[in-house]
Image (tube, rainbow, N blue to C red):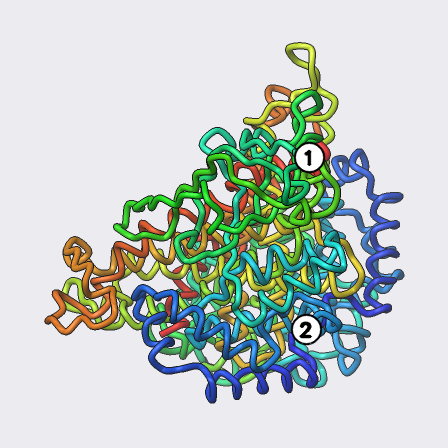
Amino acid sequence: MDLNFTPEEEAFRADVQAFLRDKLPQRLAGKVHGGRRLTRDDMAEWHAILNAQGWLANHWPKEYGGPGWNPVQKFIFENECALAGAPRVVPFGVNMLGPVLIKYGSEAQKRHWLPRILDGSDWWCQGYSEPGAGSDLASVKTTAVRGVDAQGEHYIVNGQKTWTTLGHFANMIFCLVRSATDVRKQEGISFLLIDMKTPGVEVRPIITLDGEHEVNEVFFTDVRVPVENLVGEENKGWTYAKYLLTYERTNIAGVGFSVAAFNRLRKIAAKQRRNGRPLAEDPAFAARMARVEIDLENMKTTNLRVIAAVAGGGVPGAESSMLKIRGTEIRQEISSLTRRAMGAYAQPFIEEALHDGFEGTPVGPDEAASAASLYFNNRKLSIFGGSNEIQKNIISKMILGL
Amino acid sequence: MNFQHTEDRRMLADTLNRFVSEQYAFATRDRIAQSDQGYSGELWSRFAELGIIGALFDEADGGFGGGGFDIAVVFESLGRGLVVEPFLDTLIVGRAIARSGNEAQKAVLGELIDGSRIVALAHGEPDSHYELSRVSARAERSGPTWQLNGAKAVVQHGEHASLFLVSARTGGDDDSDAGITLFLVPRDAAGVSVRGYRKIDGGRAAEVTFDNVTLSDDALLGTSDAGFATLEYAIGCGVLALCSEAVGAMDVAKDYTLEYLRTRIQFGVPIGSFQALQHRMADLLLEIEQARSAVINAAAALGAERKLRERAVSAAKYSIGRIGALVAEECIQLHGGIGMTWELPLAHYAKRLVMIDHQLGDEDHHLERFVALGR
C-alpha cells in the first residue's frame, strides 16, 4: 500500500507541468480560472496545442496517434491540466467517437475520420438525447430509412435531437437513430455519422438558466446520409452507444476540477469577510468547507483505487458510476459554497463581464460575476452523462446485484 | 501508487479473519460481550499466540509490524467480527509507552504482546467531551512523590486492567496542551477505585477515580508537563484503529442488508427490486467506499509530520462518524422490524458503528479539529 506516485509517475507529472508552463496560454488559463466563457477559437487553440504535442487523444492507442498512456498517467495529465486552468478538451470527437471508431469502425472510416478529429478538420457533437429519450435513451425515435438512389445506398433521417452541447460549433454529428421498429427497442438502433451541412439539418439554440448558449436542439428533415457513414452493423448501435458511454471514464470524478475550484474557494473565503473576520474563519462556513474538503480528499483516494484496479487488470465497470455520483456532488457543493461566499454580490448578473473584451468596472468582488452563473451551470453535472439516479440504478444492478 | 497490501499483511488478515470467523462467531461474541468479564481471557491469549497484538508494534518494541496499515488490517478484521477484546487500549497505551517510556516501563510491552497484561487509557473525564487537552485530574508534587486526584470517564475494560495510563494536570490552564503529565498507575495502588458497567454495544467499561494516589517518579511516562504530544500521537493510533474497525463492521452490515433485500419478499417480490431501496443501498455503498479511502489516507499519514498526520486522522474519524451512523441507521431501516431485534446480529453491528462515534472524539469534534489544524 503506497499512496505516493512512483518516481516514473512523478517524472511524468513534471513533464506535464513543464508542458503546461510553456504551452498553456496565460490568456486561456485566466479565462478558465476566472470562470469566463470560452469561445470556439479558444477551445480549438488548446486542441491544436495538445495535438502538436501528441497529447490530444490521450485515450487512443499509439497506432492511431494516441500517446499510449496508462490510466495513472491519464489521471495525472487530466489533474494537472485542471489545476493549471487548461480549457477542457471537447470530448465528443476525441474521447467519445474516436474510441468507437477504433473499436467498431471500418478501416476506411478510421483512415478518414480519425486524423480529422486530431487536426481539428471536424468538430463533432453528440446526437443521443431526444425530447422523449433522456434517461431512457434506448427510446430514441429519430428514424433512418434505408434506400437507393442515383448516388447510391443511403439513409433518410427524420427526427430531433436535443441537449446537443456545442452543436452550434460542429460540422459533424454522430447519432443514434431507429432503423428497425419491429424488434426490442435496443435492437433497432443504428449509429450514424451525419454531416451537418446536409440539407434538412437545422440547429436551434437552447439558452440555459445561467444565460449561456452551450446546448442546442438539432432537427433532421429528410436528411440524406450515405450508407458509408453507418458505423459497424445496422441495428447494433446500442452496443456501440453503451461502449461509448462507459469507455474511459477515468476522469468522470473530475477530481482535478474540484481541487482547482476548491483552491479558488479557499482564496475567496480568505478575502470575503463576515462578522469582522475572514469567511474562512467563520465557524459555520469553515465547517461547510471542511466537509467538502474531506469528502474530496476521500474521493481522490477512491478515484485512484478504481484507477489502480484498472491498471492492475481489473475491470472498470459500475465503479465509475460511484465516481460520477460523488464527484459531481462535490463539484456542485464547491460551486454552491463559492456562490454563498459572494454574499449579496451573487445577485448582479453582468453577463458582458463573462465574455472577452469587457472593459467595464466589475460590480463587487472579482469572482462575483461568475459565481452564481457557474453554480447554476453546474446543476447539469448530476443530470448529464446518465443522471445520478441512473448511476444508482447501474450500481444496484451491476455491483449490488439487486 | 499501489493499493495492494504487502504479502505479510495479506497473510495476517487471512489468519485473523479465519480465526475470528471460526472461533469468534456471533453466538460466542454475544456471550463474551454480555459476560460479567466483558472479554475472554482465553481468546485474548489465543489472539496473542497468533501474533495479532505483536502486529501492532514495531520490531524495536518487540513486535513485528506497527505501521499504519498493520493497525488498519488488524482492526478491520476485528471489526468484521465485532471483537470486544481489549485491543484498542493495548494499542494506545502500548504506543505511548513505546514512544516515551524508559527501559523499565518498556518491559510492559512484552507483557502486552504476549497477552499477559491488560492495560487501559484513563484520559477522558466527565466534563472533557472529547477535548484532547481538557484535563482536570491533578498531580501535585509533594517531596519525592506525586499525589494524584481526579476522575476518569468510560475507561475501556477498566475493571480488568492492571495498569492505567493516566493524564493529569501538573501545570497550565485546564484546557492547555502544556502542563499535561502522563503516569502509569497500577490498579492496586492505594486510592484507585473502579466502578464497572456494561456498554450498550457489548463489552465493559468503568469510571475510575484516583483519590490521593501516591506515585513515585518511576510512574512518570516521559517528561512532566510535556505529555500532550505522546497522548495525541497514541490516541491518533487509536483513532485509526477505530476507523478501521468501523470499515470492517460496515462491510458486514452492508452484506447482511443486501442479503435481506434479496430474500425478503413483500408484495410478491424481493424488496430489493424496489428502486427506493436500491438507491439507498447504492448511496451506502458509495459512502462506505469513501470511508475506506479515508482510512487508507489516515493509515498512510500515520508516519508523517504532526499536522499532516493529525489532519488525516481527524478527517478519517469525521468521515467514519458520519458514515458509520448513516450505515447503522439505514441498515436497521432497510431491515424493517426485524432490524430492531436483539436476536439479529446486524443490530449489534449497527450499535457498534454508532458507538464508535462516541469513542476518542465524534464527527463534530473531529471536523472542528480538522478546521483548527488547517489554520
Would you say residue B339 is visible in this rendering?
A: yes
Cα–Cα span, label 2 and label 1: 36 Å
Report crowding for label 1: few under 14, some 14 to 19, many 20 or more residues within 10 A (C-alpha): some
Residue for badge 2:
A65
Q: Nearer the viewer, residue B306 or B5?
A: B5
Q: The C terminus of chain B is located in which quarter?
A: bottom left
Q: Position of residue B369 (x, y in %)?
A: 41, 65
Q: Is residue A356 left or right of residue B216?
A: left
Q: The N terminus of chain B is located in which quarter?
A: bottom right
Q: Position of residue A8 (x, y in %)?
A: 70, 84
Judge depth for marks 2 and 1 and give the one in front: 2
Q: Is residue A56 left or right of residue A336?
A: right
Give SS at disc 1. Answer: helix
- Amino acid type, residue under disc 1 in the picture: Lys
Would you say residue B332 is visible in this rendering?
A: no
Chain letter, disc 1 residue? A
Q: Residue at x 18, y 70 (%)?
A: A358
Q: Residue at x 64, y 64 (%)?
A: A114
Q: Position of residue B162 (x, y in %)?
A: 69, 61
Residue for badge 1:
A397
Q: Residue at x 57, y 67 (%)?
A: B236
